[in-house]
Image (cartoon, rainbow, N blue to C red):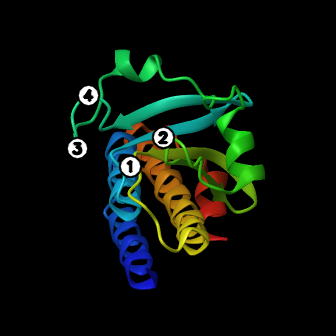
Amino acid sequence: LQVKELDCRDRLLHFQLSGPTREEAYEEVLRVAVEFAQARWAVLFLLRNEKLEAVAALGFSFPGCMENAEKIAEIPAIDSHGKTLLAQALRLRRMQSARREVAVPMFYRDEVIGIFQVGGIATVREEKNGLNALWNIGREAALVLRMAGVTDELSNGELDIEKLLELGA
């Protein structure tokens, strides 16, 4: 399990260094999460104006396929019990056993920038260790997404120099 976690985190680190766009980063984060959790699907939510917004999804219609914007817009940021996925990710820190899904926060420094949710997870023998590893992958994913945002802003000439300096700190 540790080797698999390190492999996934290393994959995200190398991907981050390639200067991906936001869309490329969304897809890679979801693919890594699905691969690590041995899940059928994943959704990436970003925190915008204190509300989770689905920005990318993988595997809902067909295994391994990214979903279109219309499908993503239909994905709610609540679980089957009506609780927000952010609350589930931060408070419960456990798998929803009946549906075999989990919401994982993505922290950039001490700030939650979003979550990814994976579902249709294969049976995890070491559930606690697996969830801890997913949290670590969530932190690495946050770095990838942050760097992708900077890359997009650089490309568009919109980069705030303070954001660039913040990345180096």
Q: Is residue 41 above or below residue 147?
A: above
Residue shown at 22% from the left, 40% from the top: 63
Residue shown at 40% from the left, 53% from the top: 29
The three-letter amino acid code for the residue at tag 4 is Ser
Of 164 and 11, which appears nearest the observer? 11
Is disc 4 surrounded by few (<14), some (14 to 19) or many (20+) residues within 10 Å? few
Which mark, by number, is residue 64?
Answer: 3
First in sequence, mark 3 or 1: give its number.
Answer: 1
The three-letter amino acid code for the residue at tag 1 is Leu
Alpha-carbon span between mark 3 and mark 1: 10 Å
Kindly indicate whether the residue at mark 2 contacts the one at mark 1 (C-beta within 8 angstroms): yes
Q: Is residue 83 left or right of residue 32?
A: right
* Residue placed furthest toward the front: 98
- Which secondary structure, mark 1? helix
Q: Position of residue 162 (x, y in %)?
A: 67, 53
Kindly indicate whether the residue at mark 4 contacts the one at mark 2 (C-beta within 8 angstroms): no
The three-letter amino acid code for the residue at tag 3 is Gly
Nearest to the eye among marks 1 and 4: give it: 4
* Residue placed furthest toward the bottom: 3
The mark total stands at 4
Q: Label 1: which residue?
A: 30
Q: Is residue 85 left or right of residue 97?
A: right
First in sequence, mark 2 or 4: give its number.
Answer: 2
Alpha-carbon span between mark 1 and mark 4: 15 Å
Kindly indicate whether the residue at mark 3 contacts the one at mark 2 (C-beta within 8 angstroms): no
Is disc 2 surrounded by few (<14), some (14 to 19) or many (20+) residues within 10 Å? many
Alpha-carbon span between mark 2 and mark 4: 16 Å
